[in-house]
Each structure stands twice: as C-alpha cells, then as structure tokens.
Amino acid sequence: MSDTKSAVGYTRLSQTSDASIPDQKREIRNLADREGFALLNIYDDGQRSSGFDAERPEYLEMQAELETGEVDVLVVRDRDRLSRDKRERSMFYYDLDEWDVELWTTTDGRVEFTDDESWLIEMIRNYMDDVTKRREIQKAKKKVQERVDNGYWQGRPPFGFRLDSDKRYLEPDPGKFDTALTVLQMRENGATWSEIEDETGVSAGTISRILDNEERYLSHVE
C-alpha cells in the first residue's frame, strides 16, 4: 500500500490585490511536490469570486470530493481563499477534521487542529479576518458613494462614452458615439432591432441600453 498522500488544491481571486490564479496554482503545485503529495486536482472558482459566498460551484464540488474520504490533504495559498466568513470557515474546519483531511497553506504550511489551543487560535483568526475584510468593504463602499456624491461617474462608461482626463465626467468617445446616435436615429425611423444590429454591428443588449439612455446621448449633441 502506498504511503503517498493524495491532495487537491483550491484557488479563487476576489480582487486585483490578491495573488493571481496562476501564481496560486504554481504555489500549490510546488508545495505538493515538496511534501510528496499526489496532487489530483486544483479546484478553481476564478476571478471576482467573493469569499463571503458559500455557494461557489468549485468550492462546493471540492467539499463533495473531500467528504468521500479519498483525499488526504487540501492545499490553498492562504486560509482566506477558502472563506472570508468566520462562521463558514470555522464550520469547514470542523468538516475537515471529521473527514480526516489535512489543511496546508503555501504561506504557513500545515494548519494544526491538534489541541484546544490550536483550535482557539484558528477560530480567533477566522473572526479577525472576517471583521477586517468587512471593514475594508464598508470603507470601499463609502469611498464610492463619496465619488458619486461629488459628481464622479462610477463604473464602466456606457457605450459611446469615455471618462474625461480627470476621470470624473463622461464625454463622447469618437466613432462609438456616432454609432450610438445612428442606433437612435434608425430606431426613430422605424428600423427593427435586427436591421439596426446588421447596420451598426451593435449587439441587441447594447442597443437596448442605448435606447434606455437616449436623453444622456442627446444631451451631448451640440
């Protein structure tokens, strides 16, 4: 019987400040090679994957495999890749203990659940990570609202527009803005969406958004 431990990895990326998915996977593979684990799979929920969402598809699929008892080790870059929510992460730790699955991180090595003290330390860490991240989110939301209140455009500019040099106001984007005006004019003349799409090359979804925001486009016509 082989003594080699089987392992799976897990990655996700919530924002640009996180380690990239390729970097996370590389670190997981390196740890598995170093420790002699047989890496079976790396589950990946990709980019813009919130750690407060417990319904991530790959995260759930990973849990289902771990529960089978056929995997010995779970490897992640850091604990917060699993979850940012203190309750979810704490319950997942209890599941790992019940399934007899070791948790390893590429930053700290093996996460120990060997005694009451180690459990307490991990529970406190879960709480602190949760509180810290929620405060960051609230601060970011407040900053966004302040920009909106001060007249800054927030988010991706609509089709046909771009942000001015101060990154504050919308201004017409040459070429695309004229295309948006063509969409409005054709619709006013009775053209069907299919005809507009064929003539302008603009998708049906974009046509809909242009028509819904007709006043914004006309307000920039000299």
Image (cartoon, rainbow, N blue to C red):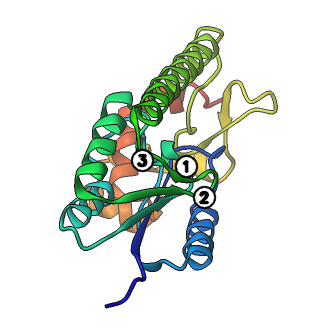
Residue under label 1, please give it. 78
Residue under label 3, please give it. 82
Residue 171 placement, left or right of 80? right
Q: Is residue 181 visible?
A: no
Residue shown at the point (58%, 27%) measured from the top left: 154
Q: Amino acid at mark 1?
A: Asp
Q: Amino acid at mark 2?
A: Thr
Q: Can you say which quadrant of the picture contains the N terminus?
A: bottom left
In this picture, is 170 found above or below 7? above
Q: Residues within 10 Å of mark 1 (few under 14, many from 20)?
A: some
Q: Position of residue 121 (x, y in %)?
A: 49, 30
Q: For residue 211, which quarter of the picture?
A: top left
Q: Amino acid at mark 3?
A: Leu
Choose the circle earlier in sequence order: 1 or 2.
1
Q: Position of residue 27 (x, y in %)?
A: 62, 66
Secondary structure of the residue carrying numbered label 2: loop
CA–CA distance between discs 1 and 3? 8 Å
Q: Can you say which quadrant of the picture contains the C terminus?
A: top right
Q: Is residue 84 visible?
A: yes
In this picture, is 185 found above or below 125? below
CA–CA distance between discs 1 and 2? 7 Å
CA–CA distance between discs 3 and 2? 13 Å
Q: Position of residue 194 (x, y in %)?
A: 28, 63
121 and 175: which is toward the camera: 121
Q: Are marks 1 and 2 in contact (CB under 8 Å)?
A: yes
